[in-house]
Image (cartoon, rainbow, N blue to C red):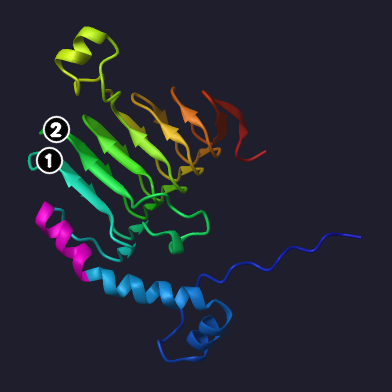
Amino acid sequence: MSESSPPSHDVTPPEALISTGALRMALDTPWRVRLEIRRLLSWPGTRLIFALAGVPWGRGWKFYGVPILQKHRRSTLSIGDALSLRSIPQSNALGPFHPVILTTRRPSAQLIIGRGFGMTGGTICAEESITIGDDVWVGGNCTITDTDFHPLDLDVRLARPLDGATAPVVIEDGVFIGMQSLILKGVRIGARSVIGAGSVVTRDIPPGVIAAGNPARVIRPVQK
């Protein structure tokens, strides 16, 4: 006897606010209705935060809860269209530990994010350069950083506590990063690769593979 596949999730939005589809969604998944209301209410404050930071507003951006934006005035922060950031526990079954944090900490820092980017909770911190391609999804409570934050040598750490080593991070198109993963400085993750949940990525990952572990290693190609 063959196993039947479970029904797929319907992610198509209702054709209109007052419609059969909207009523069905309200009855079947009432938490989505509350979430959409919160999204609409948080929109003005979120837009003001990005405007004050000098980050151009993209088309089709969605925010579930207000993210934390820490941009150095002389740094570069650019985000493509169709952005989706989930910053409140109700926005995802994984429950973000804290709002999404996007930060550029130095005058020359660059954080470049392509279109179709999605992230739940977690942090992206750029001291030097982080480049993220199109259609990259980042699972709940991940950290992506291009810096060690603090020097390893004690004397240097005491004298210059914030001068940790840095190296650029590149995440290519179509990458999926599983929840609670840590992407460290100087790595490149190849296009369409998948990083397993809870991984620590310390070296380059080639395109089109599944990698996992601490440190993360290639397990197999995405397509067998």
Position of residue 69 relative to residue 22, above or below, is above
* Pointer 2 residue: 106
- On screen, residue 205 versus residue 114, left or right, reads right
- What is the number of the mark on residue 88? none
Residue 25 image point, x, y percent = 52, 81
Compute the Cα span from label 1 to label 2. 6 Å
Query: In the current view of this chain or complex, which residue is farthest to the right?
Result: 1
Tag 1 residue: 72
For marks 1 and 2 on the same chain, the one whose residue lies earlier in the sequence:
1
Question: Circle 2 sits in a helix, a strand or a loop, which is it?
Answer: loop
Residue found at x 68% / y 68%: 7
- Locate the C terminus and report the quarter of the image it occupies: top right
* Element class at badge 1: loop
145 displayed left or right of 213: left
State whether residue 33 is above or below residue 69: below
Question: Which range of residues does the magenta coloring cover?
Answer: 44-53
Image point (30%, 63%), residue name? 61
Identify the residue shown where x is 17% and y is 34%. 109
- Disc 2: CA contacts within 10 A as few (<14), some (14-19) or many (>=20): some
On the image, which quarter does residue 128 sit in?
A: top left
Q: Residue 17: x percent and y percent?
A: 40, 87
Quarter of the rendering occupied by the N terminus:
bottom right
Q: Position of residue 134 (x, y in %)?
A: 36, 48
Magenta stretch: dominant SS?
Answer: helix
Neighbour class for label 1 at 10 Å: few (<14), some, many (≥20)?
some
> Residue 153: within the magenta?
no
Q: Are marks 1 and 2 in contact (CB under 8 Å)?
A: yes
